Image (cartoon, rainbow, N blue to C red):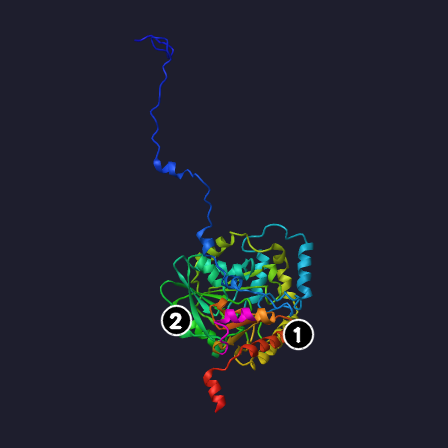
Amino acid sequence: KLPHNNGMNGNGVHHVSVRAPVSVNPAKLKSHRQRWNVRPSEMSKKTLNPIRAIVDGMKLTPNPEKPMIALSIGDPTVFGNLPTDDTVLQAMKEAIDSHKYNGYAPSVGYQKSREAVSNFYSCPEAPLEGKDVILTSGCSQAIELAISVLCNPGDNILVPCPGFSLYKTLAVSMGIQVKHYNLLPEKSWEIDLQHLESLIDDKTACLIVNNPSNPCGSVFTKDHQHKILAVASRNCIPILADEIYGDMVFPGCDFQPLAPLSSDVPILSCGGLAKRWLVPGWRMGWILIHDRNDIFGTGIREGLVKLSQRILGPCTVVQGALESILNDTPPEFYQGTISFLKSNSEICFSELSTVPGLNPVMPTGAMYIMVGIEMEHFPDFQNDVEFTERLVTEQSVFCLPATAFEYPNFFRIVVTVPEEMMIEACIRIREFCARHYRPRSQDSHELDQ
């Protein structure tokens, strides 16, 4: 047995044990970044708002001699001529003064507020309870949640053309394909049902139906909606019903929500306070889950709850005011708004329908009128974008080119502007068209004979 030497060898030198070198994985060495490389996500790069893309690319330099009239903004509050009702404001003041709504609410909304919405929209043909309502940050988030819960990347959705650009913005960013089905201007923008059905395949996850329509201002008849539902039922496709303009229809026209007409098609109906109550900035929307045959089951409901937890729901103060807003707003307020929109629409339609080269389509609801351009009579311009761009340059009137809605050779007018501005805008549009209109050669020939 060797004597203990306290870690020293016979020469009195400390013995140091040396570990074998650790082998380093070359791949790990490579992962150590040598320089900053922060890039935007693929989702952010795929997020594109077609309206912004087109408007930002336009050369919008108004005529300095004429005050600007913007007929392009879908916000009824811009000009101050359409205030919300005092009862709506009072409900908000009381909600604030109660000090009850300063904390977090459940992500799907306060139960009492959800029940206020379900009671407001429930009917015998399509009964609703509080559990069937998800409160959202505006109707836009309602649409986003509905698309997110129904679709996976690689799926496709069916979207109206012309239609609200947000559907495409949301879907494409999620890796969902958008298929456009045609609306028919000669039939007051009804859906081309044959075209719609031809687009359906095994990857179709959802049909979006927008009624009343942005940008068309059209309202579907009950008969037409039955035919839409028949297509969805035949092909087992759930519907996202964008009904934010629900009940904003002109006298003599009837708005019929989609869900009460269906016996089997599951429907997520999206709505909100923005347009009918004229408070788009308050960001209060909702999803109504219509699923009488339990086709969505618990999965879609649970999915919506989980998705709502990403941003913890809409403003609690507005939720606190919601029951009073829905129940106490007087009918005269709604009627006043609708009468104004109808009157402005009639002024715009009657003025522009006598302008050579323009073909307005009379709306029956919402806040818009679509105007067709006979481009062959306006050779100075290649398309609706150039037409509307020059209209700003020469007349200081801005209408949104319908290319923004995937529908060239039309433009959209918002009819919420004060009446005198609408009349002045129509005078300027007439003057602009008179300056640039050219009869076709065969028209000139016919005139000579």
Number of the label disc, if any, that sits on residue 420: 1
Q: How crowded is mark 2: few (under 14 residues within 10 Å), some or many (20 or more)?
A: some
Relative to 4, residue 114 above or below: below
Relative to 304, residue 17 above or below: above
Q: Earlier in the sequence, mark 1 or mark 2?
A: 2
Q: How far from the left and from the top, in percent, is residue 157?
A: 42, 64
Q: Read off the residue under disc 2.
A: 197
* Nearer to me, 261 or 69: 69
Residue at the bottom extreme, as displayed? 449
Quadrant position of residue 206: bottom left
Amino acid on which disc 1 is placed:
Glu
* Nearer to me, 74 or 203: 74
Q: Is residue 163 visible?
A: no
What segment carries the magenta color? 377-390
**Dot 2 lies on which element?**
helix
Q: How far from the left and from the top, in percent, is residue 336?
A: 65, 73
